[in-house]
Image: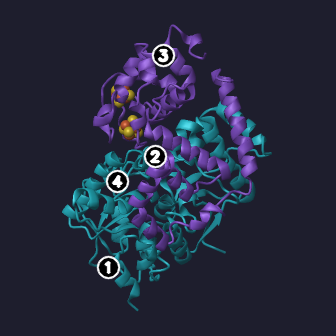
Chain colours: A cyan, B purple
Amino acid sequence: MAKKEYAFYPGCSSQLKASAANYLTSTRSLCRVLDIKLTEIPDWNCCGASIGYAEGGELPRLALNARNFALAESHLPGQDIVATCAACWLSARETKERLDASAELMRETNEALAAAGLHYKGEVAVRHMVEVLIEDFGYEALAQPVVKPLAGIKFAGYVGCQTNRPFGIAGESFENPMYLDKMVETVGGEAVTGYDQKVTCCGGALAFSEAEKSQKQIRDIVESAYDHGADMIVTPCPLCQANVEIYQSEINKKQGTKFHMPVLYYSQLMTVAYGGSAREAGLDGQLIRAEKLEEIAAKG
Amino acid sequence: MSGERYRNSFLREVEHNVEEGHWVKMCMQCGVCSGSCPFGPHWAHPPQELFMMIRAGKREEVLGSDAMWMCTSCYNCVVRCPRKLPITHIMHGLANYAHRLGLAPKNQPTRQFAKMFWDNLSKTGRVNELKLSLGLYFKDGFKQGIRNALAMKDIGLGMLKAKRLNPLELVKPHACKGAKDIHAILAKAKEIEDRRKGLSA
Ligand code: SF4
Ligand code: SF4
């Protein structure tokens, strides 16, 4: 039997051949090493993300998340729901807190679920993968399987917004959370200090609708990583990863910068440090190749 | 018209019809939230000002503003507000309410994108990233769409090569088996919410 079991909520971006497919691949790899069993919530649906608000309204978004809860409750009873995506985690956790706090919303939500023969009892716990790693395992346990420390690589820990606010990781501050830096050090990398864009917003979904305003944010995030001597940026959020990696070439084109900064997930760092191949770490999924990490992964 | 019932008090209308609107009266106008928005300079009226305008009954100015559409959902304000207002949700709620009443600015790009996003996800229960980006490129017509798509083609090809975009999403999308269930749930939820807010057609 696996050491720990969770009801897994990968979310739309972390499906195969979706924008964060490499997050999924590397998460699966690191879970194999740590003996974590992730069982997907059967037929899970989209969380609605923050940007769903304009058309979705309040109750439909709560009901969307509650459908996942009801499915987890009946198919994977007793297992905590674990999300890897910041937006999925946030939407699900917000839903849980709203429903816990209001009998009326709970009743209305269940009235909506009943249209599909579902019912949410109110028993699930919603957690982020980072919480599972830090709270259920702990830095020491996470360091144990390291066989290839990421020595000599400097990482700018870019935490971003939604893994950090409004819930965040217990015991961390909103303005300067340290967990990502600690995870980098746990796998033998060097976390650059004084990275002042650690919790800056990348524009989120508005990277699509307000491209210029968001690209200014992204420019600051990448520029500061260079200024602090980082080789790579590391993040826990799929939207941060995509925005900060994808738009570098746009910014270069428009503003004459020469950005070429790889943007990785913590799960990719861990997979390489645990001895996984480049493929297992999803490094073939980078638009900007993480060469130094590929070198370590290729070493026998 | 739903505004009628509240003709004398926009604040009451907001309290009743806007997500988390009952919090507005708790604002003490300290201005911390307004200094927290990533797109701050582009807000016609930052959150603090919107709250003041709501209390002053400036219905058309608030609901017709594109200010709250600048919200990136970064939650900076929420963790800083001394009165613990769920400001992000109030911004979402105001935008949604204005959109539902047809008072939001017509060609506001985030309004358009947010609608596309919701329509996209609610069809199959999961976001179809390819259709969403294509829809986004082509929202201003075919010619402009081709231009937009070409401008982004290197990125698209890169994503394809990195196996992070699937051309088959067009014909065989990621989808929930229970898509019909989801439609039923969403329709019911909307019906209940509309009834509660007196917005039913
Ligand atoms: S931070 Fe809170 S109390 Fe201060 S102006 Fe903003 S909403 Fe009002
Ligand atoms: S969540 Fe919205 S309102 Fe709050 S600081 Fe961010 S952009 Fe401003």
As helix, strand or loop, the secondary structure at mark 1 comes to helix
User: For the residue marked with disc 1, what is the amino acid?
Assistant: Lys
Q: Residues within 10 Å of mark 1 (few under 14, many from 20)?
A: some
Q: What is the CA distance from the residue labelled 4 to the residue labelled 1?
A: 26 Å
Q: What is the CA distance from the residue labelled 3 to the residue labelled 1?
A: 57 Å
| Residue matched to label 2 | A167
Q: What is the CA distance from the residue labelled 4 to the residue labelled 3?
A: 37 Å
Mark in the foreground, 4 or 3: 3
Tags 4 and 3 both on a single chain? no
Going from the N terminus, do you reach mark 4 or mark 1 first? 4
User: For the residue marked with disc 2, what is the amino acid?
Assistant: Phe
Q: What is the CA distance from the residue labelled 2 to the residue labelled 3?
A: 29 Å
Going from the N terminus, do you reach mark 2 or mark 4 first? 2
| Residue matched to label 1 | A292
Q: Are marks 1 and 2 in contact (CB under 8 Å)?
A: no
Q: Is residue B145 left or right of residue A15?
A: left
As helix, strand or loop, the secondary structure at mark 3 comes to helix
The picture quadrant for ligand 2 comes to top left
| Residue matched to label 4 | A177
Whether residue A128 appears in this view of the structure is yes
Subunit that carries the residue with mark 4: A
Q: Quadrant of residue B61?
A: top left
| Residue matched to label 3 | B11
User: For the residue marked with disc 3, what is the amino acid?
Assistant: Leu
Residue B7: give x, y in percent of width and height.
53, 9
Q: Is the C terminus of chain B in the top left, top right, bottom left or bottom right quadrant? A: top right
